[in-house]
Image: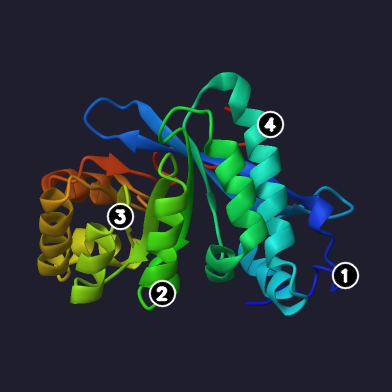
Amino acid sequence: MQASIVSDNVNIEHIVPFYQPIFNLDTGAAVRYECLARLLDENQTVHLPNDFLYLVERKKFTAAMTKRMLEMSTNFFSPKQMRWSINMFAADLSDVKILRDMTSLCLDIDKGLCGIELSYDSVKDNLPALKNFIKQIPNLHISVDDVDECTDKLHAIIASGIDAIKLKGSLVRNFASTGSSKKVIECVRHYCDEYAVNLIAEHIEDQQTLEAVKSANIKYGQGFYLSSPQTTV
């Protein structure tokens, strides 16, 4: 729902990253941090993406937002030598300036230290652009999130050289509550195992879901039950 309390004159400079860890569920160790965009208004109230992303897209500020998140996350994590990822828009894959910035950032760092997350919907019909990104920036860690189906398109994405697949929260919740998505999850896991791609369960919000994820032999997880997004790590 679009929140009227967010001004139509959204200021990109007021968008900041909050950091949510992805955990190895076997060891409990944080293996990577997702940098999640939040908007701070004049009262320092924190707004979630649903409150302001529609404005960013309407005003064609997506590239500017990606650049800001990239710069702020780089400045925060570079001294720490920790693994992190920002979310990118579909249009970012074909943005020459963003490609150049990412290439420069990843040129002299360890493979996989910095990364991006792209939604499944944004790449399933845009595989050539994804492959070009992988070719141009081999050091970049790439995750595809919001996966809720197991199709030939998903298999092609996994085979393209990405590093991780993140299962959509609704898929994980359905599996935890009724087991209805078991076959889809097993299929995705099979594809991931075939290409040594990590499989991550998103939106783990309670103990029941965590136990279900572990029972499905999913090694990595993320969600408020494990840790909420924070301003620091």
Instruction: Answer with mark 4 or mark 3, whichever residue precedes in sequence.
Output: 4
Residue underneath mark 1 = 9
Residue flagged by tag 1: what amino acid is it? Asn
Tell me the SS state at disc 4. Answer: helix
Label 1 and label 4: CA atoms lie apart by 26 Å
CA–CA distance in space, label 1 to label 3: 35 Å
Residue type highlighted by circle 2: Asn
What element does badge 3 sit on? strand
Q: Amino acid at mark 3?
A: Ile
Within 10 angstroms of label 3, few (less than 14), some, or many (20 or more) residues? many
Question: What distance separates the C-alpha of mark 4 from that of mark 2?
Answer: 30 Å
Observer-nearest of 223 and 151: 151
Mark in front: 3 vs 2: 2
The residue labelled by disc 2 is 126
Image spot of residue 161 (x, y percent): 29, 52
Residue at point 40%, 53% (across, down): 134
Which tag, 1 or 3, sits closer to the chain's start? 1
In 3D space, how far apart are the residues under numbered discs 1 and 2 (Cα atoms)?
A: 31 Å
Residue at 13% over, 45% down? 217
Q: Residues within 10 Å of mark 1 (few under 14, many from 20)?
A: few
Residue 165 got which mark?
3
Q: Is residue 145 left or right of residue 59?
A: left
Callout 2: 10 Å neighbours few (<14), some, many (20+)?
A: some
* Position in image of residue 98 (x %, y %): 63, 56
Q: Nearer the viewer, mark 4 or mark 2?
A: 2
Any mark on residue 75, and which?
4
Rendered location of residue 194, percent (x, y): 11, 52
Name the amino acid, label 4: Asn
Sequence-wise, the earlier of marks 1 and 2 is: 1
Using residue 32 as the reference point, say whether residue 68 is left or right of it.
right
